[in-house]
Amino acid sequence: MADRRLQVFHTVARLLSFTKAAETLHMTQPAVTFQVRQLEEYFNTRLFDRTHNRISLTEAGKRVFEYSDRIFELYSEMEHAVREMTGDVSGILMIGASTTIAEYMLPALLGDFKKKYPDVNLQLKVSNSDGIVHMVENNVIDLGVVESPVLNKNLVVEVCRVDQLVAVVSPNHPLASRESVTINELLEYPYICREEGSGTREVIAEYMTDQGIHNGQVHLTMELGSPESIKGAVEAGMGVSIMSSATVQKELKLGTLVPLTLAPALERPFSFVHQKQKFRHRAMDELLEFARSYCKAHPKVV
């Protein structure tokens, strides 16, 4: 409903990047540039300084950004108030999740939500936990679901369920006959882990530190970017790993991987994270309430 030029400007100003704004708005970069130039022509002044492939707001740009923030907050308040009166639950919700959650937890939850609220358009972005938190901070997504602690105290963080992590080895591995293993025993073998920025990697690293393990004691043989690639490498006998129990259910049934309980046990929370907006789309409130009920009914990932 708001002036398209102002929407585009606000996104560029918030991200300080024409490229990122184009991705967020699903526009081409020339189209974003055109909208901003039209607004600059309207005000007859530059809104951005462009130097050395970086942009910053001019004094006029800062003033326009302040007012546009207030304008869009009022729009959000108006939409929220009207939808509360009409009982309408619709609109677009941008959700972000780390890889493990997106692949193994959200499909069932979002599928059930969509059946109840067919007029809500759900769009999902997948990244590692650091990437998801960054998207929430920059309002690229409405709601994030992450698997590692969130340090930004300006965001709302709410634990939704508990995930157990287990050691996994191939069926012919020397440890395959064991039911449990200590981290010291596991790390006697080549170790395969997720990439930097992964919530799973961060949680495991903290666990290792708590158990007195130093980086020099880890024979890191591979860093891989997804649970599927790690499972394939472990199945091929290239090393051992620690993974969410939710990610290996199919392999356990097929007998291609063997799970070992870690001693002491390793669990982590899956958490919702979002901005502290006073006013939100009703669809967002309904999704949060639906997700809370879903997670209460399924408190652990198994």
Image: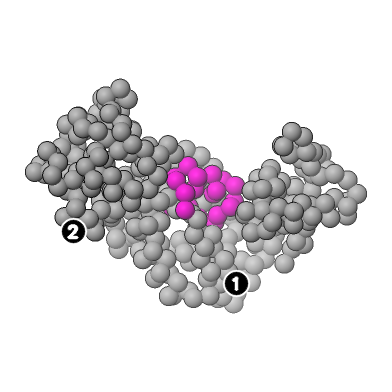
Q: Of residues 237 and 57, which is closer to you in this image?
A: 237
Q: Of residues 196 and 141, which is closer to you in this image?
A: 196
Q: Which residue is drawn at 61% across and 66% down?
A: 80
Q: What element carries label 2?
A: helix
283 over 143 or under it: above or below: below
What residue did someone put label 1 on? 83
Q: Residue at x 65, y 62 (%)?
A: 77
Q: x, y (%) of residue 243?
A: 28, 45
Q: Which residue is drawn at 68% across and 44% down?
A: 17
Position of 109 with respect to 29 (left or right) is left
Q: x, y (%) of residue 173?
A: 14, 41
Which amino acid type corresponds to the residue marked 2 in the rendered image? Leu
Position of 51 with respect to 251 (left or right) is right
Specify whether residue 256 is in view.
yes
Which amino acid type corresponds to the residue marked 1 in the rendered image? Arg
For residue 160: magenta? no
77 over 265 or under it: above or below: below
Specify whether residue 149 is in view.
no
| Mark 1 or mark 2: whose residue is earlier in sequence | 1
What residue did someone put label 2 on? 254
Give the extent of the magenta segment.
126-145
